[in-house]
Image (tube, helix red, strand yellow):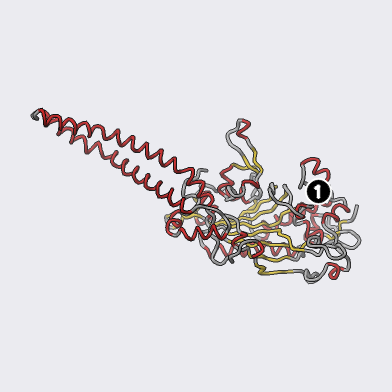
Amino acid sequence: MSYHCGDMIDLKQLREDPQRFKQAALDKNIQVDVDRILELDSARREAMSSQEAARSEQKSIGKKTGPQIGALKGRLKSASDDEKAVIEQEIAQLEQRPQELKEQIQQLDRRIEQLKPELDELLLKVPQPAAEDVPRGRTEADNIEILAWNPEQFDPGISFRDNRGFDPRTHIQLLEAMGLVDFERAVKVAGSRHYVLRGDGMRLSQAILRYAFEMMVDEFGFTPMSVPVIVRENAMIGTGFFPSGRDQAYHVEETRRGSGEDLYLTGTGEVGLMSLHADEILDIDQLPLKYTTVSTCFRREAGAAGKDTAGLYRIHQFDKVEQVVICEADPQQQKQWHQEMIGYVQTLLQRLELPYRLLQCCTGDLGPKNEDMIDIECWMPGRGEPDSQGHPTGQYGETHSASRLGDFQCRRLNLRYRENGRNVFCYSLNNTVAATPRLMIPIIEMNQQEDGSIRIPQVLRPYMGDREFMQPS
C-alpha cells in the first residue's frame, strides 16, 4: 500500500470548509494545524500547476521551435552583421528553452517532495468529524446512557446481597479460590498484566469465543476469516490506529535486525480484516462485506493505571471475536448496520443473562477515526467502591465498542467500489462480539453461588462438558 496527500482526508472538503475540520479536532480534543495544512496544500498545488504547464510546453516545444529556428537560420544568409547578432541570440534562446524547462520541472519536483512529508504528517492527524447527531462533550463523563437491560432475576439498582442473599466476591477472589487462574506464574513468564487461565478458566474462555464466533457465522451470516495479527505499518496507518495510537502498539523492530520493514502486533482483528482489501476496487454487488474473526490481540496499555489494572480487566494480551462491515457510501445504510451490529451483541449478552447498558459516546470520547461510537458496558458486581463492610458495590465496565467510521479507513486504505462508472470510497463499521478474558468477569461474578461454585450460562454448557456448575477444586 502507498499513501498520498488526499488519501487521508477529503482535501476538497477541507479546502471548502476548513472550519468544519477545525471544529472536529476541537470536539475530539485533538491538536492539528488546519491553517498550516491549507498553506502547504496551496503551495503544493501551485508547484504542481507550474510543473504541469512546463511539461505541456515541453511536449509542444519541438513542433513550434523547429520551424522557428529553420526560418531564423534562413534569414541569416542575407542578414547584415548587426541583424545576424540578433538572429543568433534568438536561435540560442530557442535552443536553450528545452533545457530550461527540464531544469524547471526538476526544481518543481524537488519542491513538491519537500512539501510532502510535513503535509502528510499533518493530514494523518486530521480526525474524522463526528456525526451531527453525536452529542458534544469533553470526556467520557459526558457520555449518555441510552438503554439498559437486565434479566428479571437481577436488578443492578440494588445491592448484590439484596438480589442474591449473600455478599459478592470479585472475579479475582473467585478465580483464585477455584484454581482457575495463575497470576504469579504469568508474571514470572511475561511481567505485569499477564495471566494464565487454567482448567475450567481456560475452558470458559474458549467457550465464550466459540459460541460468539459460531453465532456470528451460523445465525447472522458473517464470513469467517483468519487474519494476521502481526502487520506492516501501513495497515496500522490505513485503519487509523497510527499515528495517535502508536504508543499502544507493540513494535517489532525488524529493520534493526536487517529485515526490510518493521512490524506491529495488532490490538484488534479489525486491522487485518479491513486491510485485506486495501488498494482494491470492489464491484457494488460484492457489498456489504460481513467479516468476523477470532484473534489474539495485544495492547501495551501505556499510561493506564489504577484499580482497573488488577485481575483480568486491563491486560496486555487477550482474545477477541470481532465483526466488521464494509458497505456502500450511504449514511442511512451505515446507521442501519450500526444498529444491527449492536443488536447482535445485545442478543449475545441477553443469552448470557448479563445486565448491560448502551452508552452514546460524546465527541470528546471518540477516537480520531470514529464518526460515531456506542460503548456497551456489562454490570460487574466485583467493581465499584466498597460499602461500609468492605464489599464491592458493583459497577458497569466496558466490554464492547461499536463504531461507524464513514469513509475514514477506506480512504486511507484506498478501498473503493465501482458505481455508475465511477469509483467511490466504501464506508466501514466495526464492533466487538466478545473479548475474553474481560467478558469472563461479569459471567463469573454474576453467576457466583454462595457455596463458591460458579453457574455456567446455559448457552455455554455444550462447550463445558454439559455441566451446570464449575466447582471449587
In the picture, measured across the screen, residue 353 lies left or right of residue 29, that is right
* Amino acid at circle 1: Leu
Mark 1 closeness class: few <14, some 14–19, many ≥20 residues within 10 Å: some
**Residue 297 in sight here:** no
Q: Nearer the viewer, residue 7 or 367?
A: 367
Q: Nearer the viewer, residue 414 or 103?
A: 103
- At mark 1, the secondary structure is loop
Q: Is residue 115 above or below residue 401?
A: above
Identify the residue shown where x is 40% and y is 47%: 43
In the picture, measured across the screen, residue 79 lies left or right of residue 156, that is left
Task: Report x, y in % for residue 340.
Answer: 62, 64
Numbered circles on residues, count: 1
Task: Report x, y in % for residue 144.
Answer: 65, 67
The residue indicated by pointer 1 is 197
Identify the residue shown where x is 72% and y is 69%: 149
Residue 111: name its quadrant: top left
In the picture, measured across the screen, residue 459 lies left or right of residue 95, that is right
